[in-house]
Every structure is written in structure tokens, then in C-alpha cells.
Amino acid sequence: MDANSSMELIELQEELHATQQLLQHEKEENEYLRSLLRQLETGGMAVGLTRAPQDDGHDDDDDDDDSDRAKARTATLELKHAEDKIRQLEMALLDTEETVCHLKAERLEALREVERLSLVQATPSGGSSSSSSSSGQSTEELHAELNAYRNQVYALEHQLADVHKQHAVDQEQCAAVIREQEQEVRHWKDEWKKCREANRTLQEAHDGLREQLQQALQQQDRGDNQRDHDEPEVADWREELIRHPTPSFDLDSPEVQYLLHSWTSNVKKLQYLRVWLAHIAHDTGDLPTDFPLGLELPRLAPEICDGFLTLVVPLLRKQTKREIYVHTRRHQDDYHADLRLRIVNRSE
């Protein structure tokens, strides 16, 4: 029976060593999960800090950051749950170690009892009957206690196996959540890179347009300044003092009509000018009170202006009741000219 106890104790020690190795492996996996969670939290914080300056009022980026932080908190809670499972497993391991210690103590006690029985057997056989009965009773008690401890160890082993299975399931779920969060973080990092690239492109386009606008404004300012600098002063009116000879025809002649049609093709302007010239040319009767005593013809070609000066003005000066004053003004193109006729009644 002592050999059986030794074998069972050796088996318990081997199982205890295997349990310790399993617990150490689970601690290493737990530490690996911790490092992954820290990397995930660090990546989520980096994404959140980088997106903050680009927000400009976009609420979708804030919702995505809140979702990432919520998932990180969920992973943290699951990791804490796994740590609680590990602590329970450690408590079970401590109970197993305590049981092993009790078994060692019982083994030592059994060895002492065996030694005592050996000494009793070595003595004279006077009390052999009582000693054999007490020895048999002690051996049965040890065997019963050993069976009880063995059953307790088996129960602890089953409990430890269940805890290990549950821990493996929790660990797999936590790893799946972490992998999903890592995939989401990579996706949001890619989206953030695309947004940053698009923002950089838009910024470059904006800078280019702003530079073009500044160049256009500078060119416009230079052009305005150049025009202000180059714009000459308006020429003054000059009185025409040369008296041309009076033609042998009147205002209704083909020459004068050709001149008027060359001046304009507007029928109303032609009729108005003919009526005005007819009133001025005839010296019979006074002019109406509302009759305009001046007339200005703008932007005349040189030949048209000369025609009025050499044909129309001399015909108007044939009458003796009114004085005709003529002024001209050259344009900046040195081609066109303005003609102004002014009528003054002569005093009798």
C-alpha cells in the first residue's frame, strides 16, 4: 500500500507540474493579448488625434472615433474577464498544491506508521493480535483517505479542464474581437490616408488658384495703373476761323444730301438735322422760343467733318440775321473729330 501511495503522489506531482506549465502558458497568452490591446488603443488614439484638425464640422469622423473607443473598451472588459478566469484557475491550482501538501504529510505519517508497525513486528509476539488488528485498521483508514484525496484530485482536474476550455473559448472570442478591431483600424487608417491625400490635392489646387488670382489681380492693378498713367488729357475745343466760299447750290442739293446720308443712315436723325438746318438757313421770321441754338455732331470722319465745314456752314452763313460759330475737337485716335455749331442772333 505504501508503494501505491508513492505512485499516486508522484502522479499528483506530475499533474501539478503540468498544471503549472498550463497556467504559465495562459499567462503568456494573456500578456500577448494585453500587448495587442495596447497597440490597438495606441492606434485608435493616433487616428483620433490626427483626424481632429481636419474635422471642420464633419460629425461622421467623431462617430467613427467613438465607435473605435467603444470597441476598445469592450475588448478591455473581455480581457479583464479572461484575467478573472486566470485568477480563478490560479486559486484552483493553489488548492491542488495544498492538497498535494496534505498528501505528502499523510504519506509521511503513513511512513512513520509503517516504521512503527515494523518495530512492533520486530518485538516479541505477545501483543501480535492487538497490533495486527490496529495495523489493519490504520491501513484501511489510510486507503480510504487516499481514495478520498484521489477523488478530490480528479474533481479538481475536471474543474481545471472545464476552466481551461472556458478560458480557451473566451480567449478565442477576445482574439476574434481584437482581429476585427485591427481590421477596422486598418480600414479607417486607409480611409484617413485617402482623405489626407484628397485634402492635400485640394489644398494644392486651392493654392494654385489663389496664386493665379493674385497674379491676375496684380496684372489688373498694373494695367489700371498703366492706363491711368498713359491716358492723355482730353483735347480742348478749337474754333474754326477759316471762312470757306459759299457754294452755288442750296441745302436741298444732291451734294448736301449725299453728305448727310454719309454722316448717318438713321432717318430720324436725318429729318431732325434737315429741319434744324432749314430753320437756321432761312432769315425770314424768328426762331421758336424752344428752338435749340446749338448742335453737336460727335465722332465724325475727317471727310464728313470737312464736308460740313466747306458745304453746310457756308450755306448757313448766307442769311444775315444770325451769327454761326463753329468749334471742333480732335479725338485721341487723331482721326475722328467732334463738330459743334452754335447760333447767336445778331442785334439790329
Image: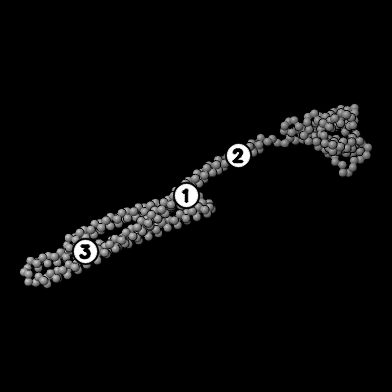
Amino acid identity at mark 1: Trp
Amino acid identity at mark 3: Leu
Residue under label 3, please give it: 103
Residue beneath the point at 78% across and 29% down: 302
Q: Which of marks 1 and 2 is nearer the N terminus?
A: 1
Give the vertical position of 299 relative to 183 (above or below). Answer: above
Residue beneath the point at 89% across and 32% down: 251
Question: Mark 2 and mark 1 in contact (Cβ < 8 Å)?
Answer: no
Give the vertical position of 59 relative to 269 (above or below). Answer: below
Res 265 quadrant in image: top right
Considering every residue shown, the one lying at the far left of the view is 124
| Residue 326 can be seen in this image | no
Considering every residue shown, the one lying at the far right of the view is 284
Q: Residue 188 carries which label?
A: 1
Q: Which of 207 and 54 is in front in this view?
A: 54
Q: Nearer the viewer, residue 267 or 201?
A: 201
Give the vertical position of 45 relative to 204 (above or below). Answer: below
| Residue 63 can be seen in this image | yes
Q: Where is residue 46 in the image (x, y as percent from the top left)?
A: 43, 51
| Colour convention | one colour
